[in-house]
Each structure stands twice: as structure tokens, then as C-alpha cells.
Amino acid sequence: MRVSVIGTGYVGLVTGTCLAETGNEVICVDIDESKVEKMKNGEVPIYEPHLDVIFERNIKANRLRFTTSLEEGLNHGDIIFLALPTPEGEDGSADLKYILGVADDIGKLIKDYKVIVDKSTVPVGTSEKVREAIAKNTSVDFDVVSNPEFLREGFAVDDFLKPERIVIGTESDRAIQLMKKLYQPYVRSGNPIIVMDEKSAELTKYAANSFLATKITFMNEIANFCEKVGADVDKVRIGMGTDSRIGKRFLFPGIGYGGSCFPKDVKALQKSGLDLNYDFKILNAVIETNTTQKTILIPKIKNYFNNNLKGKNIAIWGLAFKPETDDIREAPALFVINELLKEGVNITAFDPEAMPNVERQLGSKIKFVDDMYSALDGVDALVICTEWSIFRTPNYNKVRDRMKETVIFDGRNLYELNEIHKEVKFYSSIGR
Ligand code: UDX
């Protein structure tokens, strides 16, 4: 099939590349000329495991092309994906200026029937607004479909190629048939393509992400309570998670959820509620608890150092909001660093992928090093903010040789308590 993807951010790029991988002819459109030029030369603008290989393969096969021309993109595709940013506006609601701006242009350029697909995470009612924005400039027939993405960073390629479900929101039979044809190769295993009205599809995305954020936050509170009563959250987690109604996944406590989706989506759903005089009390609590959780290690660190952190040297392992990404949006590590800097701490940080992004933001406020052990040279403590695999089995001889004192604050519960207590002088984690 012929497909176009407008916007080559994280979602657009993964969508375009993975659609080309099953033989579709894809054109990706972006207004950023230098980015388009780089992509034409085979350069992937984001870090995402496995994306580079299929990106290169499909460019070589001429199934994946790039342009800055919306007109070229629109003429090419039978299906046009909108994968545009929906940043958090000042009041917490999703800002639709990019999506509606492109919709307006589509109305001016459209020549024949197209299915316009909303891939971005958008509030309920956006498809309708997109339809209106297009229709005011044209009398050509088209359909608008809501098709939310459920891609996890770090696993996006796999999530796209083998989705647990595809949600399609539209009542147009013509659009349903085209969308089903497009997605059929991805659900061979029998996973469902769920067709519903567009509003329900739009809400499904917010409901799913807000539920997951709530699940994590609930566990974070259980972890905090475990510390009060002397229970071990790892045990509680396993005890709970084996109940299939609860499920094992997304029960890992830590220093809060971050990233480009959960924080933004939870706030946007809360705001959509308020706009309609509906107070989402559970989401209010989730947002508040997660804010506190991001810096939950700080009082523990202060307590250990008798409330005086000034001039202390502290290493940070992990800056990305989660492993296997260089994304630092809403990353708990940044909140931890900010608090430590306020206390007058000297920080040395290591992350396998995210250091350039943090350096752009923090400049010389903290020191960056090229390997995890160099970060430990002469430090008073180590704080772990992201559960990268390489941190899981450190060489403790090196850790002891390099740290002034082997004091570890672990925001991701990486180590078995029995083991770690044999290796280091002091170890503190979450809920254990
Ligand atoms: C998420 C959703 O999973 C995906 O379906 C959606 O469409 C986009 O948002 P992503 O933000 O890439 O994906 O990351 P995810 O793996 O879901 O983790 C989100 C946050 O929750 C991270 O900060 C992670 O550290 C945290 N988390 C996750 C926990 O603290 N505990 C857990 O058990 C799981």
C-alpha cells in the first residue's frame, strides 16, 4: 500500500519505518530540512534499538523516502498518518496547534479520497476538530481515523511489528477496510484489531497510560509503606503479581515514572476532566505522589550525611528516564540532580546513551564521564536512577577501590539485599 507519515518524531519515524518493512511504499514528511537531508542519507535521528537496521534496509529498497513537501506526501499516500507533537500546553491540556495546522493545509492540498489517521495522543474530540479543519477548505471526500500508538521507547520496533492490539476508531467502512488491510501483516499471531468509534479510541490511549501510571504509583506508595512497617516490597510485589487479575508487569517501584508519555497523558486526562467539571481524584493523587516519589531518595541521602551535603561528591548512574533510550524528558534523574545541586553537592554522572542530552540541558553544572567506574572516583556516595543492565552486576572490587565510602542509594532496586550487604558498607533502596 502507499502510505505517508507526517512528522518524523519518535512515533512517526518508527511507524514509517515499520510500515515500509512489510512492503508498503512509505513517504515521511517533516518541515525540518536538515533532518530530512540526514534521513535521506540513512542517518536515524533518534536512538531506538533495532530501528537503524530496518531503516537502512528500507531506504536501500526505496520503500522508505523522505521529503519536506506536505503536498508530495499527501499525493503519495492512500493513508496519511499524522504523527505530530502534542506538547503540554500551559494549562496542562494537549496543545493541538501542529495537528490542526497540518489539517488546515491538507484541506487546501487534497485532490482525492484519503484516510487521515491521528496517530498522536490527542484528547477526545480531536478527530472531529481535524475533520472540521480539513473540510472547511475542501469538498473532496476523506475520512479521519483515530489510531493510537502504544509503543514503548526501547521496544518500539517490536511493539510495532508485533502489537498486542491495534485500536481503530472510525465508523467509516471504507476506512476500516483500508486500515485492516494495512495492519493485517502485524497481527498474524491472532492479536486483535479492535474497531470502535473514534472518541472511544481516543480515550483508550489516555485510559491505558493513566492506568499504568496509577499502577506504578500505587506500588510506589506500597513501597513507601513497606519501609514504615519493615516489609519487603519485592516480596509483596511477587505475592500480588501472581494473581492474574493484577499481573506481574508494571508493579516495579522506583523513583517515579517519567518519559514523554505518562506524565503528559495523565495531566491531559485530568485537564480534560476539569474542562467538563469532572474531577479525576485518582489522577490528582497519582500526579502528586509521583512528584514526591521522584525525589524520595533525597531525605534518605540527607539523613545519612547528617543533613549536610555541602561539598559532598556524589556519583549518578543512569540519566535517561528508563533504560534503552537516550530520552531524558521528565527523567527522575534530573529531579534528583537538581535537588542535590541545591544542597551544594558535586555530581559526576554516567549514562550509556543520555549524557549528550543532559549536557545540553545542564552544561558544566555536573561532570560527565565515559564509563560507570570512573564516575565513582573518590565519591562519598552513588545514586542509581536508571536500571540499565550494565549496572546490575558491577565488579565490586572496582567499586570498593574507587569510592571513598561504599554508600549506595538505589532508586531502582537493582540488587539482592543479601548479596549487596556483603559487598558495600551502606545500601538503601525503595521499599525494602
Ligand atoms: C509508555 C507506554 O508504555 C506506551 O504504551 C505508550 O504508548 C507510551 O508511554 P514509555 O514512556 O516508552 O511507554 O515507557 P514505559 O516502559 O511504559 O515506562 C514509563 C515509565 O514508567 C518509566 O519512567 C519507567 O521507569 C516507569 N515504570 C515502568 C516504573 O517505574 N515501574 C514499572 O514497573 C514500569
Image (tube, rainbow, N blue to C red):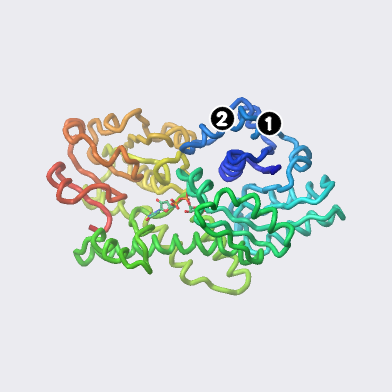
Q: Could you say where residue 61 lies in the image, as x and y percent from the top left?
A: 62, 29
The image quarter in which residue 205 lies = bottom right
Q: Residue lying at the far left in this picture: please name it.
A: 422
The image quarter in which residue 277 lies = bottom right
Q: Residue lying at the far top in this picture: please name it.
A: 41
Q: Nearer the viewer, residue 145 or 291?
A: 145
Above or below 135: residue 38? above
Local SS, label 1: helix
Q: Three-letter amino acid code at disc 1?
A: Glu
Q: Residue lying at the far right in this picture: please name it.
A: 139
Q: Three-letter amino acid code at disc 2?
A: Glu
Residue at 44%, 60% in the rendered image:
213
Local SS, label 2: helix
Above or below 284: residue 378? above
Question: Would you say 35 lies left or right of 245 here?
Answer: right
Number of residues whose C-alpha sits closer than 10 Å to that of mark 2, classed few (under 14), some (14–19) or many (20 or more): some
Residue at 45%, 33% in the rendered image:
359
The image quarter in which residue 250 lies = bottom left
Q: Quadrant of the N terminus?
A: top right
Residue at 23%, 47% in the rendered image:
415
From the viewer's perspective, is the residue at label 1 or at label 2 nearer? 2
Q: Earlier in the sequence, mark 1 or mark 2?
A: 1
Question: Would you say 317 lies left or right of 27 here?
Answer: left
Q: Could you say where residue 105 lies in the image, as x and y percent from the top left?
A: 79, 47
The residue under label 1 is 33
Q: CA distance from mark 1 to mark 2?
A: 19 Å
Residue at 57%, 60% in the rendered image:
268
Number of residues whose C-alpha sits closer than 10 Å to that of mark 1, classed few (under 14), some (14–19) or many (20 or more): few
The residue under label 2 is 56
Q: Quadrant of the C terminus?
A: bottom left
